[in-house]
Image (spheres, rainbow, N blue to C red):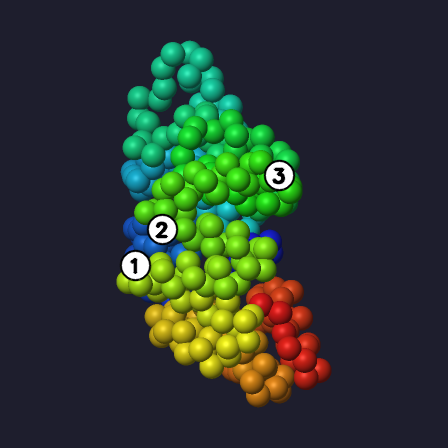
Amino acid sequence: MLPSRQRMGITQAQKKSRAQGGGGQDITLNFDHLVTSRDYTGALALITTLRQAGDDAVKKEVRAGDVDLWTAYLQFHLGDYEASLKTLRAKREKVKKEEGSGHSDGDAKPHAASSASLSLSIAIVLYYLGKYEEAMIEAKASPQSSRKYRLLLHLSSKLNDDATVTEAFEYLQSKSDEVDNLLSIAAAHFDRYSFSEALDIYKRVLLSTKEAVAVNVFAALCYHLLEYQDVAQEILQQYMQHEKASLFSANLAACIISSERGGKEAERYLLDYLQKNDRTEVECGDLIGHNLAVFRGGSAGQV
């Protein structure tokens, strides 16, 4: 499943983070904190400000990696995929010139990328833009990795390329000790409406990886679609105890409530969530607006 292609709004936690950092503290104090607290808007604004101050200021603050790659990362997480794609392509051209000249930037960071590895990042952004054929070309040009085959699995499913589906599936199965590979296989099952198969994998991951709390959401979603609403609600609550502000979880909880107690109860729950987290219907995107309209009509919503 893909997140919304609309830009993400600033969450209550992000607003709190900014408020705490605004009490006379230097804005350049903590790029790492902005990223960790998922204030991607603030982190991107900080990079822009530091670029205006010069390269030394940027390098001093953004220590853990390449600034161009951080910029693309932040643009991506803000849902500005076109900007992220433009940044990555410009970075690849720059790296190609350095590779062709036989030397690279002497101040290269630990996370500096090769032009070939950047192809995979570009492919991921193209995937989110829905440009699957272009993404397939870029992905196949990237070095061998589990991440590459996870993307190929989903791309080939979108393009009905059965040969590549089989190749990617077999590769990921051979490395099923990697949790991300298992989750990718589960997502592929989910996309094919094989909810029971996806659920089996999610349960396996939850048993073996205690810190994978977020997987409870996907397990709950499968139970909801399989019409085990009580179980879905119980499992979802295990995650919401950790992430009370999760919009996806709140939407799923509302859909479960709608299935059990009707649209009016679901509408009341979702509106209460929006109020508590200082969010609006418009900010939360089309899905929430659609579901609220559906709940008001007394029907089940979409997840």
The residue labelled by disc 1 is 209
User: Residue 295 at what x, y percent from top left?
Assistant: 65, 80
Please tell me which residue is depicted at 50% across the width and 77% down the height of the picture: 228
Label 2 element class:
helix
Label disc, if present, on residue 161 of the rendered structure: 3
User: Residue 114 at what x, y percent from top left?
Assistant: 41, 26
Q: Is residue 243 left or right of residue 283?
A: left
The CA distance from mark 2 to mark 1 is: 8 Å
Residue 175, picture quadrant: top left
Kind of residue indicated by mark 1: Thr
User: Residue 262 at what x, y percent from top left?
Assistant: 61, 86
Kind of residue indicated by mark 3: Asp
Please state which of residues 251 and 238 is positioned toward the viewer in this rendering: 238
Label 3 element class:
loop
Kind of residue indicated by mark 2: Val
Label disc, if present, on residue 179 of the rendered structure: 2
Label disc, if present, on residue 14 of the rendered structure: none
Quick check: marks 2 and 1 in contact, CB under 8 Å? yes
| Quadrant location, the C terminus | bottom right
Task: Say if 230 sits above or below 54 in the image.
Answer: below
Please tell me which residue is depicted at 41% across the width and 44% down the height of the picture: 173
Please tell me which residue is depicted at 53% across the width and 63% down the height of the picture: 195
Around disc 3, counting alpha carbons within 10 Å, would you say few (fewer than 14), some (14 to 19), or many (20 or more)? few
The CA distance from mark 2 to mark 3 is: 25 Å
Dot 2 or dot 1, earlier in sequence:
2
Task: Say if 165 sits above or below 205 in the image.
Answer: above
| Quadrant location, the N terminus | bottom right
Around disc 1, counting alpha carbons within 10 Å, would you say few (fewer than 14), some (14 to 19), or many (20 or more)? few
